[in-house]
Image (cartoon, grey):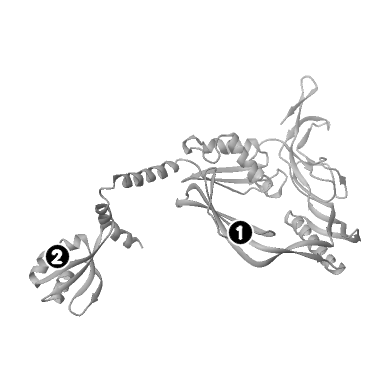
Amino acid sequence: MFLSIVKYFRGFLLVRLSGYSPERFLNLCSNHNILIWNLSNGGEYYEFYISLAGFRKLKPLLKKTKTRLVILKRVGFPFFLYRYRKRKVFFAGIAGCIAFLLYLTTFIWLIDINGNSSITDETILTFLEEKNSAFGTKKSRINCAKLEEELRSEYEDIIWASVRLNGTKMTIDIQENLLGSKSHMESKEEMEGAYDIVAKQDAVVTSIITRKGTPQVKAGSEVKAGDVLVSSRLDIYNDSQEIINYVYTCSDADILGQTTYTYEDSFPLQYTQKVKTGESFCRYELSAFSYKIEIPSFHKIKEPCMVYKESRQLAIAKDYYIPITINKITYSQCDYKQITLSKEQAKQQAKENFSQFLKKLEEKGVQIVDKNVMIKYKENKCHVTGSITGLEDIGRYQAAQVEIIDTDEGTKEYESD
Protein backbone atom coordinates (compact mmCIF):
# COMPACT_ATOMS: atom_id res chain seq x y z
CA MET A 1 0.00 0.00 0.00
CA PHE A 2 2.73 2.45 0.99
CA LEU A 3 4.80 1.58 -2.08
CA SER A 4 1.79 2.19 -4.34
CA ILE A 5 1.31 5.66 -2.82
CA VAL A 6 4.99 6.50 -3.37
CA LYS A 7 4.78 5.34 -7.01
CA TYR A 8 1.67 7.46 -7.59
CA PHE A 9 3.21 10.67 -6.25
CA ARG A 10 6.45 10.11 -8.20
CA GLY A 11 4.59 9.16 -11.38
CA PHE A 12 5.05 6.15 -13.68
CA LEU A 13 4.40 5.05 -17.26
CA LEU A 14 2.95 2.07 -19.09
CA VAL A 15 5.20 1.49 -22.12
CA ARG A 16 5.50 -0.95 -25.04
CA LEU A 17 8.97 -2.24 -26.03
CA SER A 18 9.69 -3.56 -29.54
CA GLY A 19 12.71 -3.84 -31.86
CA TYR A 20 15.78 -5.92 -32.57
CA SER A 21 16.79 -7.23 -29.12
CA PRO A 22 14.19 -6.55 -26.43
CA GLU A 23 15.53 -9.37 -24.17
CA ARG A 24 18.96 -7.75 -24.09
CA PHE A 25 17.31 -4.44 -23.21
CA LEU A 26 15.58 -6.05 -20.22
CA ASN A 27 18.88 -7.56 -19.04
CA LEU A 28 20.57 -4.14 -19.27
CA CYS A 29 17.76 -2.62 -17.19
CA SER A 30 18.46 -5.20 -14.49
CA ASN A 31 22.23 -4.52 -14.63
CA HIS A 32 21.65 -0.75 -14.30
CA ASN A 33 19.18 -1.18 -11.38
CA ILE A 34 16.27 0.26 -13.37
CA LEU A 35 13.05 -1.02 -11.85
CA ILE A 36 10.29 -2.32 -14.11
CA TRP A 37 7.16 -4.22 -13.02
CA ASN A 38 4.10 -6.02 -14.38
CA LEU A 39 6.09 -7.24 -17.40
CA SER A 40 3.94 -9.01 -20.03
CA ASN A 41 4.91 -10.66 -23.34
CA GLY A 42 2.75 -9.77 -26.32
CA GLY A 43 4.65 -11.90 -28.86
CA GLU A 44 6.44 -9.23 -30.91
CA TYR A 45 6.56 -6.72 -28.07
CA TYR A 46 6.74 -6.40 -24.30
CA GLU A 47 4.65 -4.16 -22.07
CA PHE A 48 5.63 -3.05 -18.57
CA TYR A 49 5.45 -0.21 -16.04
CA ILE A 50 8.44 2.02 -15.28
CA SER A 51 8.99 5.07 -13.09
CA LEU A 52 9.67 8.52 -14.54
CA ALA A 53 13.17 8.52 -13.06
CA GLY A 54 13.89 5.12 -14.66
CA PHE A 55 12.43 6.19 -18.01
CA ARG A 56 14.91 9.09 -18.22
CA LYS A 57 17.82 6.60 -18.05
CA LEU A 58 16.68 4.46 -21.00
CA LYS A 59 17.99 6.44 -23.99
CA PRO A 60 21.50 4.86 -24.16
CA LEU A 61 20.04 1.39 -23.57
CA LEU A 62 17.55 1.80 -26.40
CA LYS A 63 20.32 2.94 -28.73
CA LYS A 64 22.58 0.04 -27.79
CA THR A 65 19.88 -2.65 -28.25
CA LYS A 66 18.20 -1.03 -31.29
CA THR A 67 14.81 -1.06 -29.63
CA ARG A 68 12.15 1.57 -29.25
CA LEU A 69 9.55 2.49 -26.63
CA VAL A 70 6.02 3.76 -27.07
CA ILE A 71 4.26 5.38 -24.08
CA LEU A 72 0.77 3.89 -23.70
CA LYS A 73 -0.35 5.45 -20.45
CA ARG A 74 0.77 8.13 -18.00
CA VAL A 75 -0.16 7.61 -14.34
CA GLY A 76 0.57 9.67 -11.19
CA PHE A 77 0.37 12.99 -9.45
CA PRO A 78 2.85 14.87 -11.72
CA PHE A 79 0.67 14.16 -14.77
CA PHE A 80 -2.43 15.18 -12.82
CA LEU A 81 -0.84 18.55 -12.04
CA TYR A 82 0.22 19.03 -15.64
CA ARG A 83 -3.23 18.09 -16.98
CA TYR A 84 -4.99 20.66 -14.76
CA ARG A 85 -2.20 23.25 -14.65
CA LYS A 86 -4.49 26.00 -16.00
CA ARG A 87 -7.28 25.40 -13.46
CA LYS A 88 -6.00 27.70 -10.72
CA VAL A 89 -9.33 27.92 -8.90
CA PHE A 90 -9.44 24.13 -8.60
CA PHE A 91 -6.02 23.98 -6.93
CA ALA A 92 -6.85 26.99 -4.79
CA GLY A 93 -9.93 25.10 -3.59
CA ILE A 94 -7.81 22.05 -2.69
CA ALA A 95 -5.33 24.25 -0.80
CA GLY A 96 -8.19 26.01 0.99
CA CYS A 97 -9.76 22.67 1.96
CA ILE A 98 -6.46 21.42 3.39
CA ALA A 99 -5.95 24.69 5.28
CA PHE A 100 -9.48 24.47 6.69
CA LEU A 101 -8.92 20.89 7.86
CA LEU A 102 -5.67 21.94 9.54
CA TYR A 103 -7.53 24.78 11.23
CA LEU A 104 -10.17 22.35 12.53
CA THR A 105 -7.42 20.29 14.20
CA THR A 106 -6.82 23.19 16.63
CA PHE A 107 -10.20 22.53 18.30
CA ILE A 108 -11.69 19.74 20.42
CA TRP A 109 -14.26 17.72 18.48
CA LEU A 110 -14.58 14.56 20.58
CA ILE A 111 -14.75 14.09 24.37
CA ASP A 112 -14.21 10.56 25.71
CA ILE A 113 -15.11 10.00 29.40
CA ASN A 114 -13.99 6.82 31.18
CA GLY A 115 -14.31 5.46 34.72
CA ASN A 116 -17.49 7.24 35.81
CA SER A 117 -20.42 5.35 37.31
CA SER A 118 -22.38 7.51 39.77
CA ILE A 119 -21.50 10.74 37.95
CA THR A 120 -23.11 10.75 34.50
CA ASP A 121 -21.50 11.84 31.24
CA GLU A 122 -24.02 14.68 30.97
CA THR A 123 -22.92 16.02 34.37
CA ILE A 124 -19.27 16.10 33.33
CA LEU A 125 -20.10 17.65 29.95
CA THR A 126 -22.10 20.38 31.72
CA PHE A 127 -19.11 20.96 34.00
CA LEU A 128 -16.84 21.34 30.94
CA GLU A 129 -19.24 23.89 29.41
CA GLU A 130 -19.13 25.94 32.60
CA LYS A 131 -15.32 25.88 32.46
CA ASN A 132 -15.30 26.83 28.74
CA SER A 133 -13.63 23.54 27.82
CA ALA A 134 -16.45 21.75 26.03
CA PHE A 135 -16.98 20.50 22.45
CA GLY A 136 -15.61 23.00 19.92
CA THR A 137 -13.19 24.75 22.30
CA LYS A 138 -9.79 25.79 21.01
CA LYS A 139 -7.11 23.48 22.42
CA SER A 140 -4.81 26.37 23.37
CA ARG A 141 -7.44 27.59 25.87
CA ILE A 142 -7.65 24.29 27.76
CA ASN A 143 -5.51 23.83 30.86
CA CYS A 144 -5.52 20.07 31.56
CA ALA A 145 -3.86 20.33 35.00
CA LYS A 146 -6.38 22.97 36.11
CA LEU A 147 -9.31 20.90 34.87
CA GLU A 148 -8.08 17.87 36.83
CA GLU A 149 -7.85 19.93 40.02
CA GLU A 150 -11.31 21.48 39.50
CA LEU A 151 -12.89 18.07 38.85
CA ARG A 152 -11.54 16.75 42.16
CA SER A 153 -12.63 19.83 44.10
CA GLU A 154 -16.07 20.09 42.44
CA TYR A 155 -17.08 16.45 42.98
CA GLU A 156 -16.26 14.77 46.28
CA ASP A 157 -16.72 11.29 44.81
CA ILE A 158 -13.83 11.83 42.36
CA ILE A 159 -10.55 10.93 44.05
CA TRP A 160 -8.42 10.91 40.88
CA ALA A 161 -8.78 12.57 37.49
CA SER A 162 -6.71 12.72 34.33
CA VAL A 163 -7.34 15.01 31.33
CA ARG A 164 -5.39 14.41 28.11
CA LEU A 165 -5.47 16.00 24.66
CA ASN A 166 -4.64 13.76 21.70
CA GLY A 167 -5.22 15.33 18.32
CA THR A 168 -8.76 16.76 18.41
CA LYS A 169 -9.84 14.31 21.12
CA MET A 170 -10.07 15.05 24.85
CA THR A 171 -9.85 11.96 27.06
CA ILE A 172 -11.06 12.25 30.66
CA ASP A 173 -10.25 9.32 32.97
CA ILE A 174 -11.67 9.52 36.47
CA GLN A 175 -11.80 7.24 39.48
CA GLU A 176 -14.80 7.49 41.76
CA ASN A 177 -14.80 6.27 45.31
CA LEU A 178 -16.65 7.03 48.48
CA LEU A 179 -14.34 7.32 51.45
CA GLY A 180 -15.90 4.26 52.99
CA SER A 181 -15.25 1.85 50.14
CA LYS A 182 -12.84 -0.97 50.81
CA SER A 183 -10.68 -0.27 47.80
CA HIS A 184 -10.20 3.29 48.96
CA MET A 185 -9.19 2.26 52.47
CA GLU A 186 -5.95 0.89 51.05
CA SER A 187 -5.07 4.26 49.53
CA LYS A 188 -6.06 6.14 52.67
CA GLU A 189 -2.56 5.73 54.12
CA GLU A 190 -1.38 8.69 52.05
CA MET A 191 -4.16 10.98 53.35
CA GLU A 192 -3.71 13.23 56.35
CA GLY A 193 -6.25 14.22 58.98
CA ALA A 194 -8.70 12.67 61.39
CA TYR A 195 -11.44 10.41 60.02
CA ASP A 196 -14.11 8.44 61.87
CA ILE A 197 -15.78 5.38 60.41
CA VAL A 198 -19.57 5.77 60.46
CA ALA A 199 -22.42 3.54 59.36
CA LYS A 200 -23.57 4.18 55.82
CA GLN A 201 -26.94 2.51 56.45
CA ASP A 202 -29.05 0.84 59.13
CA ALA A 203 -27.61 -2.56 60.04
CA VAL A 204 -26.75 -5.06 62.76
CA VAL A 205 -23.00 -5.38 63.30
CA THR A 206 -21.85 -8.99 62.84
CA SER A 207 -18.09 -8.52 63.15
CA ILE A 208 -15.60 -5.70 63.72
CA ILE A 209 -11.81 -5.82 63.46
CA THR A 210 -10.17 -2.52 64.41
CA ARG A 211 -6.62 -1.66 63.38
CA LYS A 212 -6.63 2.09 64.11
CA GLY A 213 -9.02 4.12 66.23
CA THR A 214 -11.36 3.38 69.12
CA PRO A 215 -14.29 1.01 68.43
CA GLN A 216 -17.68 2.34 69.55
CA VAL A 217 -19.75 -0.76 68.80
CA LYS A 218 -19.39 -4.51 69.05
CA ALA A 219 -20.82 -7.57 67.30
CA GLY A 220 -24.59 -7.67 67.75
CA SER A 221 -25.03 -3.88 68.05
CA GLU A 222 -27.84 -2.28 66.08
CA VAL A 223 -26.71 0.90 64.32
CA LYS A 224 -28.41 3.65 62.32
CA ALA A 225 -27.03 5.43 59.28
CA GLY A 226 -24.50 8.02 60.46
CA ASP A 227 -23.66 6.37 63.83
CA VAL A 228 -19.96 6.37 64.66
CA LEU A 229 -18.57 2.83 64.50
CA VAL A 230 -14.87 3.56 65.06
CA SER A 231 -13.72 6.87 66.51
CA SER A 232 -10.48 8.41 65.32
CA ARG A 233 -9.85 9.79 68.84
CA LEU A 234 -7.35 8.05 71.12
CA ASP A 235 -7.40 9.13 74.78
CA ILE A 236 -4.11 9.84 76.55
CA TYR A 237 -4.17 9.14 80.34
CA ASN A 238 -1.83 10.20 83.14
CA ASP A 239 -0.80 8.11 86.13
CA SER A 240 -4.08 9.00 87.88
CA GLN A 241 -6.04 7.61 84.92
CA GLU A 242 -7.22 11.09 83.98
CA ILE A 243 -7.53 12.12 80.34
CA ILE A 244 -4.91 14.76 79.66
CA ASN A 245 -4.94 14.87 75.88
CA TYR A 246 -6.41 13.43 72.70
CA VAL A 247 -4.58 12.04 69.68
CA TYR A 248 -6.41 11.72 66.36
CA THR A 249 -5.70 9.34 63.52
CA CYS A 250 -7.29 8.00 60.36
CA SER A 251 -9.43 5.10 61.55
CA ASP A 252 -8.95 1.73 59.94
CA ALA A 253 -11.24 -1.25 60.48
CA ASP A 254 -13.16 -4.05 58.77
CA ILE A 255 -16.80 -3.87 59.81
CA LEU A 256 -19.40 -6.28 58.50
CA GLY A 257 -23.08 -5.82 59.15
CA GLN A 258 -26.37 -7.51 58.35
CA THR A 259 -28.58 -5.28 56.21
CA THR A 260 -32.12 -5.59 54.86
CA TYR A 261 -33.33 -4.52 51.42
CA THR A 262 -36.97 -4.31 50.33
CA TYR A 263 -37.96 -5.44 46.85
CA GLU A 264 -41.01 -4.35 44.85
CA ASP A 265 -41.87 -5.09 41.22
CA SER A 266 -44.99 -5.20 39.08
CA PHE A 267 -45.78 -5.73 35.41
CA PRO A 268 -48.97 -6.27 33.36
CA LEU A 269 -50.11 -9.73 32.32
CA GLN A 270 -51.37 -8.33 29.01
CA TYR A 271 -49.45 -5.87 26.87
CA THR A 272 -48.89 -4.87 23.26
CA GLN A 273 -45.54 -5.61 21.63
CA LYS A 274 -44.05 -4.51 18.32
CA VAL A 275 -43.03 -7.39 16.06
CA LYS A 276 -40.91 -6.97 12.92
CA THR A 277 -42.55 -7.92 9.63
CA GLY A 278 -39.18 -8.37 7.88
CA GLU A 279 -39.29 -5.26 5.64
CA SER A 280 -36.67 -2.60 6.38
CA PHE A 281 -34.74 0.19 4.67
CA CYS A 282 -32.03 2.68 5.59
CA ARG A 283 -31.81 6.45 5.36
CA TYR A 284 -28.65 8.52 5.83
CA GLU A 285 -28.06 12.02 7.08
CA LEU A 286 -24.98 14.16 7.46
CA SER A 287 -24.43 16.31 10.57
CA ALA A 288 -21.90 19.14 10.46
CA PHE A 289 -21.65 21.45 13.47
CA SER A 290 -25.31 22.23 14.29
CA TYR A 291 -26.63 21.58 10.77
CA LYS A 292 -28.16 18.40 9.36
CA ILE A 293 -28.38 17.39 5.72
CA GLU A 294 -30.82 14.58 4.97
CA ILE A 295 -30.07 12.40 1.98
CA PRO A 296 -33.38 11.83 0.13
CA SER A 297 -34.79 8.31 0.15
CA PHE A 298 -37.30 6.81 -2.25
CA HIS A 299 -38.85 4.70 0.49
CA LYS A 300 -41.91 5.95 2.31
CA ILE A 301 -42.05 5.59 6.07
CA LYS A 302 -45.11 3.64 7.10
CA GLU A 303 -46.39 3.37 10.63
CA PRO A 304 -45.94 1.39 12.76
CA CYS A 305 -42.19 0.98 12.47
CA MET A 306 -39.11 0.50 14.64
CA VAL A 307 -36.29 3.02 14.29
CA TYR A 308 -32.60 2.36 14.97
CA LYS A 309 -29.93 5.03 14.67
CA GLU A 310 -26.17 4.52 14.30
CA SER A 311 -23.73 7.44 14.30
CA ARG A 312 -20.11 7.58 13.21
CA GLN A 313 -17.90 10.64 13.56
CA LEU A 314 -15.39 11.15 10.78
CA ALA A 315 -11.63 11.43 11.38
CA ILE A 316 -8.82 12.44 9.01
CA ALA A 317 -6.32 10.40 11.07
CA LYS A 318 -6.12 8.59 14.40
CA ASP A 319 -7.48 10.85 17.18
CA TYR A 320 -7.96 13.69 14.65
CA TYR A 321 -11.74 13.88 14.50
CA ILE A 322 -13.69 16.53 12.63
CA PRO A 323 -17.19 17.86 13.48
CA ILE A 324 -18.89 15.81 10.77
CA THR A 325 -21.04 12.80 11.67
CA ILE A 326 -22.72 10.28 9.37
CA ASN A 327 -25.99 8.96 10.77
CA LYS A 328 -27.51 5.73 9.54
CA ILE A 329 -31.21 5.44 10.37
CA THR A 330 -32.82 2.04 9.88
CA TYR A 331 -36.61 1.76 9.65
CA SER A 332 -38.10 -1.70 10.15
CA GLN A 333 -41.77 -2.27 9.41
CA CYS A 334 -43.56 -3.91 12.30
CA ASP A 335 -46.97 -4.84 13.56
CA TYR A 336 -48.59 -4.80 16.98
CA LYS A 337 -49.12 -8.11 18.69
CA GLN A 338 -51.16 -8.68 21.83
CA ILE A 339 -49.19 -10.70 24.40
CA THR A 340 -50.94 -12.48 27.28
CA LEU A 341 -48.80 -14.07 29.96
CA SER A 342 -49.96 -17.16 31.81
CA LYS A 343 -49.32 -17.36 35.56
CA GLU A 344 -46.43 -19.70 34.92
CA GLN A 345 -44.89 -17.29 32.39
CA ALA A 346 -45.44 -14.36 34.74
CA LYS A 347 -43.75 -16.30 37.53
CA GLN A 348 -40.76 -16.96 35.29
CA GLN A 349 -40.58 -13.26 34.35
CA ALA A 350 -40.74 -12.29 38.03
CA LYS A 351 -37.87 -14.69 38.80
CA GLU A 352 -35.73 -13.17 36.06
CA ASN A 353 -36.36 -9.62 37.30
CA PHE A 354 -35.59 -10.67 40.88
CA SER A 355 -32.36 -12.39 39.75
CA GLN A 356 -31.25 -9.18 38.05
CA PHE A 357 -31.89 -7.26 41.28
CA LEU A 358 -29.82 -9.77 43.28
CA LYS A 359 -27.03 -9.59 40.70
CA LYS A 360 -26.79 -5.80 41.10
CA LEU A 361 -26.58 -6.19 44.89
CA GLU A 362 -23.80 -8.75 44.56
CA GLU A 363 -21.91 -6.42 42.21
CA LYS A 364 -21.98 -3.85 45.04
CA GLY A 365 -20.36 -6.37 47.39
CA VAL A 366 -23.48 -7.57 49.19
CA GLN A 367 -23.39 -11.23 50.20
CA ILE A 368 -26.95 -12.60 50.10
CA VAL A 369 -27.82 -14.40 53.34
CA ASP A 370 -31.60 -14.83 53.04
CA LYS A 371 -34.40 -13.80 50.71
CA ASN A 372 -38.17 -13.95 50.95
CA VAL A 373 -40.41 -13.14 47.97
CA MET A 374 -44.20 -13.19 47.52
CA ILE A 375 -46.05 -13.10 44.17
CA LYS A 376 -49.65 -11.86 43.86
CA TYR A 377 -51.91 -11.48 40.82
CA LYS A 378 -54.27 -8.53 41.04
CA GLU A 379 -56.03 -6.26 38.51
CA ASN A 380 -54.44 -8.01 35.54
CA LYS A 381 -50.99 -7.37 36.99
CA CYS A 382 -48.31 -9.42 38.64
CA HIS A 383 -47.09 -7.85 41.90
CA VAL A 384 -43.86 -9.03 43.53
CA THR A 385 -42.77 -7.97 47.02
CA GLY A 386 -40.05 -9.28 49.25
CA SER A 387 -37.07 -8.63 51.46
CA ILE A 388 -33.41 -9.57 51.13
CA THR A 389 -31.02 -10.00 54.01
CA GLY A 390 -27.41 -9.33 53.13
CA LEU A 391 -23.97 -9.20 54.67
CA GLU A 392 -21.71 -6.31 53.62
CA ASP A 393 -19.17 -3.71 54.62
CA ILE A 394 -21.24 -1.02 56.36
CA GLY A 395 -18.52 1.52 57.15
CA ARG A 396 -17.63 4.77 55.42
CA TYR A 397 -15.19 7.50 56.35
CA GLN A 398 -16.26 10.85 57.71
CA ALA A 399 -14.09 13.79 58.72
CA ALA A 400 -13.88 13.88 62.54
CA GLN A 401 -14.48 16.84 64.79
CA VAL A 402 -11.13 17.43 66.48
CA GLU A 403 -11.36 18.28 70.17
CA ILE A 404 -8.36 19.95 71.85
CA ILE A 405 -7.78 20.08 75.60
CA ASP A 406 -6.27 23.35 76.80
CA THR A 407 -4.14 22.18 79.74
CA ASP A 408 -3.51 25.74 80.95
CA GLU A 409 -7.12 26.86 81.11
CA GLY A 410 -8.67 23.45 81.70
CA THR A 411 -11.12 24.07 78.87
CA LYS A 412 -11.86 22.28 75.62
CA GLU A 413 -11.74 23.72 72.14
CA TYR A 414 -13.21 22.22 68.97
CA GLU A 415 -11.85 22.29 65.47
CA SER A 416 -13.37 21.00 62.28
CA ASP A 417 -10.99 18.82 60.31
Q: Which mark is residue 325?
A: none
Position of residue 324 measured from the top left corner of the image (x, y, whole percent): 50, 48
The residue that appears at 8% across and 68% down in the rendered structure is 63
> Three-letter amino acid code at disc 1?
Lys
Specify the quadrant of the image occupied by residue 283.
bottom right
Mark 2 and mark 1: Cα distance apart in space: 63 Å
Residue in the foreground of this view, choosing between 150 and 17: 17
> Three-letter amino acid code at disc 2?
Leu
Tell me: 331 left or right of 274.
left
Q: Mark 1 points at which residue?
A: 300
Residue in the foreground of this view, choosing between 189 and 268: 268
The residue that appears at 79% across and 65% down in the rendered structure is 338
Tell me: 122 left or right of 199.
left
Q: Mark 2 points at which residue?
A: 58
Look at the numbered disc 1 and give the secondary structure of its residue: loop
Look at the numbered disc 2 and give the secondary structure of its residue: loop
| Disc nearest the viewer among 2 and 1 | 1
Q: In this view, does 180 lie above or below 263?
A: above
Residue in the foreground of this view, choosing between 358 and 310: 310
Tell me: 310 left or right of 198.
left
Label 2 vs 1, first from the N-terminus: 2
Position of residue 211 measured from the top left corner of the image (x, y, whole percent): 74, 46
Q: In this view, does 390 lie above or below 124?
A: below
Q: In this view, does 250 lie above or below 67?
A: above
